[in-house]
Structures are given as C-alpha cells and as structure tokens.
Image (cartoon, rainbow, N blue to C red):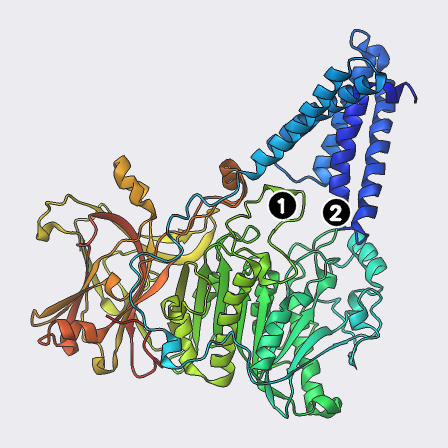
Amino acid sequence: MKKLFSDSFFLATALIVVVLFGIAGYHFELGLPPLVGMLLAILIGIILLIGLKLIASLAKPLFKKISFGFLTTFLSGLLALVILKMFAFRWPSLLFYILVLWGFLCCVLLVLGLKKVKGGKNNKSGWVMVTTSLVIVALGLYGFNSLDGDPYIKDKTQPKNNTNSAMLSEMGVQDPSQKGPFEVETFTYGSGTDAKRPEYAEAVQIKTPTVNASRLLPEWKGKKKKWREKFWGFGVENFPLNGRVYMPKGDGPFPLVLIVHGNHSMVDYSDAGYAYLGELLASRGSIAVSVDQNFINAHWSGDFRGKEMPTRGWLLLKHLEQWKKWNSGEEPDLAGKVDMGNIVLVGHSRGGEAVSIAAAFNELERFPDNAQETFDFGFGIKGIITVAPTDYRYEREITLKNINYLSLQGAYDSDEVSFWGMRPYRRLHFTDDFKGFKAGVYMNHANHGQFNSSWGRSDFGAPLKWLLNLKPLVSGEEQRQMAKVYISAFVETVLKGKNAYRTVFKSADGIKDWLPNEMYLSQYADASKKTLLDFEDDLDVTSGKENVQIRAENFKIWREEGLKSRDDGKQENNALVLGWKYGKQSKKDSLPQYHINLQKELKDFSAVDTLALSVGVGDISELDLTEKENDLSDSGFNFSIVLKDSLGNKASVDLASTNSLPVPIKTKFTKFQFLDREMMGKDWEVQLKSCYMPISLFSSKNDSLDLSKLYTISLVFDKDSLGVVVLDDIGFYGDGKLPEKPPILD
C-alpha cells in the first residue's frame, strides 16, 4: 500500500477522483448534511479506485509489455470516472471527459511539483509546476465562466415601436402587487406527527387526518416505497394534508387560493417558497394556502415520471374537502371564514399540470384510471393559474370548459424550455354566455426556479448547473414581482369581480410601471370574441369559418401550419405563415396582400369595438436574404390593416400605431451553443402576441366607411420590404361583452 501511494501517477489519478467524487457527494440529494455527503462520496471514490486497481492487478500476466502500475491505475481511474459520470455527473460525455483531462493535467503537475519540493531537489522547477497547475485551474475557471451572457439582448428589453400606451395607474387602478389593507395571520395545519417537518408536527395549529392514495398511486412500490417510507415514516395509505396558511384577519368570508409546488427534490422542501404570494394575497383579502406535496417529489431512489400527476391534483381537492368541513363548523376558528364558491388553484411546474387535473377531477364522479375510487367534490373552482407548467406528464390530455385560466412562462426556463401552458389555453373553450377569460404571458430572461423563492437561479442541481448560462437572468425579486402582478390581478378579477384588472392580461404595454423592464408577449381571449380565422378548421387555405373566403397575392411564403416548440414538440396550435420580399421601387399593386372576404354581414356590428389578431415573427431565413437583410432576423415587421365596405369605401391603420411589434425572444440556456442544441433545441420558438385595433380608428380615417356593410379585411405589407410573420385568431371583440378596451392610444 505504501508503494501504491508513492506512485505519482496513482496519486494524481486519486486526486482527480477525490475532487470529482467530493463535488458530486456534496451536491447529491441524500437528505444528509452536504459535508457528510461529500466525505461519504470521497470514501466511496477511494475504495472504488483501490478496489478496481486490485482487480486490474489480477490481469498482470496479460500485459507484460506495459507498465503494470500505469495500466492498473489507468483502468481503475477510468472505470471510477465512468461510474461517476453514470450516477452523478449528467454532463454530455465530450464535456465531462475534457474536464477530466484538464483536471488530470492539473493534478499531475501539482503532484509532481509537490514531490520535487518535498524532496528538496529542483525546488525551483517544483514550484514552477505547482504554480503552473494553479494558473491553469484559474484560467480554466475564468474562461469557463466568461462564456456567460446574452448574445441576443441588443436593445430588446422592450419590443420595437412602443406606442404611447395609457398606463392603468394613470387611470386610478392600483398596482395589484402592492399589499392590501388586511393584517395577515399565518399558521400551519397538518398531521401533527411529521418526523421531518416540525412545522407540520408540534407546530401545527390544526391537526388534519391522513388520506389513502393507494388507488391513485399504485407505483408506490419497490425501492421508492422502501426508501420513502423509511425517510418520511408514512406510506401511500396515509398521506398527510399539510399546508401553510396566510389568512386575512377579519370575519370573512374570504375567497380561497391554493398554491402548489412542482417536482423539486423531496428533501429540499418547496412549500415555503410561495410565502411572497401568500402574504400578498392575504393582505388583499383572500385566504392563501401553500400546499405541501414534497413526499411525492423526486428522490435519489427514483422519480414517479408523471405517474403521480393524478395524485397531485387529487390531493388539492382533498385539501378543499377539509376546508369545507372546517368552514361548516368542524373547526370553530375557521367556521364561516371561507367563500367556498370562490376558489382559485395556482400550480408551479408539475403543480401547474396538477391544477388542470384537479379542475377536471372536480367535475367527475370516479377516478378515470381506477373507477373503484369515487369522487364527490364539486367545489366552486373559478380559475386556475399555471406557472411554468408541464402538459405531458399525465397520459390523459386535460380539456377544460368555462373556467378562467392564466399561464406564466419564462423564456430562460431550462427545465420546461417551451411554453407548455399555452396548450391547455388552446384546448380550453367557452360557451357564449361565459363571462371569464384566458391569458398567457411570456417573459424574457425569466427562468423556472425563481417563481419559488427557495429554488434559486439554477434550474438544475450541481454539477449540471455549472453548464447553465445564468448571467442573463432577471433577479429573483424581479421575477417574483412579475408573478405578483399577474397572479394578484387574476385573483382580483376572477374572485372579486374587479374587471379593471382584466386589461392587465391583454397587453403589458399599459402596466410597464408595475413590471420589471423586460419584454413580454401576452395572449388573451374571452367568449365575446367573434373569430373569423383560427386556421384549425380544414386543409383549405382559401376558406375560414362561416364561409369566409381568403385570397392572397405577391407572397414568397403562404401556408398554414402547426406551430412547433423549440425541441420540435407540438404547440397544438395551427397558424398562418406569410413571407414577402420586394424591392423599394415596387409598385403599389404588386405589394403582398392577404384578403379576408366576408360572405355575409356581421350581426350587430354596432356593438363591435375592437379588431384583434395574434401576431408573431416567423423564420426569415426561409427567404433568399443578403447578409445585410439577415440582420433583420430579430426585428418585428409592421403592416397595414385595411377595412373596406361593400360600397368600396375603405380605411387603413398600421399595426404599430397602436401596438408594440412582437419580436423573436431568443435564448442561450447554457455556456455552449452546441449544448443548447443538444439539450434544449433551437434558440427560439414562435410565441404570439395579442394585438388590438380600435374600430374607431378606422372610422376616424374615413367617415364614409360603413362598417355595417364591412366586406373585406386586408393585411397589406407596405411598411417593411421583407419579413415573415405568423398570424392567428383574427376577429372582433364586441357584443357588449368586452369589459374594457385594451390600454392603447393612437
């Protein structure tokens, strides 16, 4: 053994193994203190290295011509590192082994240098080697971290061509992220026996019964069952109902908001990370509860891979069931405190998919995956909010009806890299008499984790998180400010009927003084919209709803297609793609034009007040571009909208006169572009923005225009000589149902 540790090559190999195993152990989620995990991993690494070297020694006769010590050290070190990569370092192979070679070079220089210094001979060369190894380490770390940054930022903190939009605050509407007049009482409820969470043990104010989820989660078995039950002290037959309550002081009854986390590590508890929302909502007159579901989260023993999704949704309903009992008098301090007909569910990550599942299960009599489990819920869930949600974990596709909906997403979300929350938005449909709405908001430079105050800036754990490009991210405070504005405004609108806040969801242009200075793409719809074209009906590009006829001319690109996410997944939305390129000397009659011909008059057009359409930027690389023209790939493209009546009278208004033009939001998730393509997909995906044109603008341009005889809506691309745009959901708001116009002025 003494001879073994006098071998410089073995010592260098052992050093790199110790360093990497120590790093992995420090960050591995075992539920132990990090230093204990690090020491345990180092011990495993050393034992593994020595054991593999001893095993390799048995093959000595086969390698007589090769230095036996070199060979056994090389094989044992390589095997140890391969095992480390398999179980701890989830880096791409190329990057991992480049790191190993770089680290090994540094370790060889360091060990040889220290031996020379210790031996008393060639001290000078020894110190040079030691210094060189340290310099290489410093330069490597500096170079690695210098790869951070946003190559796409330019001046795009706000979209191009901002209009002078009227601010809601100037109209006397209060910032919904500001604390309200209520004092807030906080407490926890739970099983009262939680061995890991004192806040749900001796600190609980109200004890709750456990619930049996065995029919919903039959996957609670094997090592998942063994290790989880050993850690938590309970199993699937007796899941606790644990929650953190933020309650306004007063008689009530108050609306109820449940907030649920996603699939973070189960030993890094997530439910405290929404206190900023709980305290805000309670101060404004709603009871907010952050629900604990950590016991079904990821663990080193395994992830349920989405099989637990029904349980996540069902548990929310069991919490509501308990609140109903308390409200009816079972708990005197809470009797009559809750308006059980006014409930909103908020979910983050997998919790975002869970709230859709809960809303669907709320209407069912039996669990669809095992009808032996009966349901009796029927709570007054008026809305759901999904924050950076999944929409693919549960094998059943959830389609909802007549419920208010909001989804928030960050463009720099490394965990859920696409805006999956817009898929349930598309599937959600309203009847004509429904008074609610649906909306989606896409924020640049926001990530996945910072919507939870305890998850942090990195969407991955170490060591994988070191590959992430974190420099472009907004601060956690800024990201949570965005969440407070939108979530609070949603609660104020849906649960308290304050329709002045509905404008918040139509466009970020009128609330810029409430939000961090970033780019936002908002989409909005409600039942009052008369949609002429949504491109979902058939394969015929020349027709639309109710016999609407289409004609297009002078385009380089004209097609309808299903939009893709950055990783080529489906957005579950069809849209129109138009591309054009023409010279500056082109005649007016050769301009690209897209004509929507109405075959019959719109009923009661006098009640229509707004023309609306969703707009995005397509991929202009599809056009034959010069190098200079290609510089416009990050631009928004303006065009005119022309209304023409059956008598030939017409009026034209350009899009940018009342809207900020949408631009592509591009991202660099990791330090390496090739790694982005491998792990995340493309550097952007088409995200649309709802744009609005007040009908009064057209009338002011030509008072002879008779809108009751509207015949043609034309999109004329006369403002930019080239571009590719994506269009969807073209139609009108009116019939007296739109509460207020978007905050846009000429």
Label 2 amino acid? Phe
Q: Observer-nearest residue: 444 or 573? A: 444
Residue at 11% in and 50% down: 590
CB within 8 Å, label 1 to label 2: no
Label 2: which residue? 28
Task: Name which quarter of the figure residue 171 lies in.
Answer: bottom left
Measured Cα–Cα span from mark 1 to mark 2: 13 Å
The answer to whether 479 is drawn above or below residue 563 in the figure is below
- Residue 238 horizontal side relative to residue 425, left or right: right
Q: Nearer the viewer, residue 577 or 440?
A: 440
Q: Which residue is mark 1?
A: 465
Give the percent coordinates (x, y) of residue 692: 29, 68
User: Dividing the picture into quarters, in which one does residue 73 lie?
Assistant: top right
User: Is tag 1's residue or tag 2's residue first in the polypeptide sequence?
Assistant: 2
Element class at badge 1: helix
Locate residue 602, reporting x and y percent. Answer: 22, 76
Q: Is residue 118 above or below residue 334?
A: above
Residue closest to the far top: 65
Q: Residue at x 64, y 27 (%)?
A: 136
